[in-house]
Amino acid sequence: MQNLRKSSPVAQSAAPGASQAVHPPASFGVLLKRSITLMKPITWFAPAWAFLCGAIASGALTWELTSLGYLLLGLLMAGPVLCGLSQVINDYCDSEVDAINEPHRLIPSGLITPRHVQIIVTALLIFGSLLAIVLGRAVALFVGIGLLFAMAYSMKPFRAKRNGWIGNTLVALSYEGLAWLAGHATFAALTWESKSLPLVLLFSIGAHGIMTVNDFKSITGDTQMGIRSIPVMYGKRIAARMVVATMAGAQFGVITLLVVWGHLIAAAVIGLLLLIQTIPFVRFVRDPDHNAVFFNATAIMLYVWGMLVAAIGVAA
């Protein structure tokens, strides 16, 4: 979910920190593969899943072809198009850090040129905007807010990612909160009485902790570049505890709300999922470096299943 300014550095100069190596011209197929790789398909899941949860929580999603068609368009918009767009711009803006942490990546290595980045960004931005308009004015509004958040996160002079509290909050709100609200708004009007609103807030708070997990692998480069991520500011052990506390606290809040609203089965299921998460929680706090992969595959996966359970619960 990103945009470019009129005087975009993408169009004017080589990416900062990028390799100056000259590579032979690539075929269309190779360029397409590199473009998709740069869009990081693995990251598309989070906003697409949140959109799905919002659609279900609206209570208006049906098995009719029209309804399913809108759902597919929304998943395409939230995941491959807008999330992919955000990843491309973030990688460009991060090329200096990546040149230290992961110099083999496409932009630092010179396999993706600034011109190529500009083309990808323009195409995805236009396509994503058109999809948002088709899905409705409220969806377009949430997409617009997400674009502003994404610009503030990655691009100068704001570059909110330089602070782990601010940057991770913007990402969590975009990937979980705004995507969920867009899914709800596609099928039903959002009001102050909508149960999606407090659920979005809590799940976004928990997602802040999830975003912090991604910062552990880049501590060296972040430290050198002056990026104050949560692990850089507080150290690995304290940051790991903060991740666990944030995720657990958010889910406990969701369980409490579901109990108050009378959705006891959904509350019990999420409670069970939270109980199972204590195993990866403990392992991650003890050794975040060697348990990050296990944590992603267990605790975070159980967390996102809890999102779906909550959505089904309030829609019932």
Image (cartoon, rainbow, N blue to C red):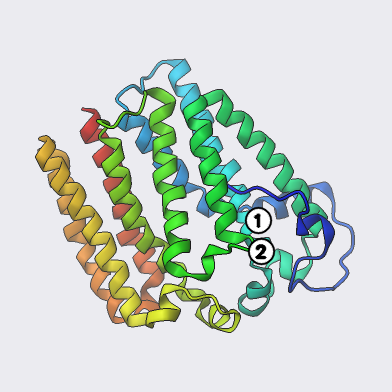
Q: Residue furthest front?
A: 157
Residue at x 22%, y 59% (from the top left corner): 249
Q: Are marks 2 and 1 in contact (CB under 8 Å)?
A: yes
Q: Position of residue 156 (x, y in %)?
A: 64, 63
Q: Quadrant of residue 102?
A: bottom right
| Secondary structure category for the residue under label 2 | helix
The foreground one among 44 and 33 is: 44
Between the residue at mark 2 and the residue at mark 1, the CA separation in whole angstroms equals 6 Å
**Residue 212 visible to an observer of this rendering:** yes
The label on residue 93 is: 2
Residue 71 falls left or right of residue 94:
left
Residue 149 location (% of width, % of height): 52, 51
Give, as a three-letter code, the residue at label 2: Cys
Q: Provide residue 205's location: percent of width, then percent of height.
A: 32, 56
Residue located 55% across and 36% down the image: 76
Which residue in the protein does label 1 denote?
A: 89
Task: Indicate the amino acid at tag 1.
Answer: Ile
In this view of the protein, which residue sits in the foreground, 245 or 109? 245
SS assignment at label 1: helix
Residue ID at (60%, 53%)? 151
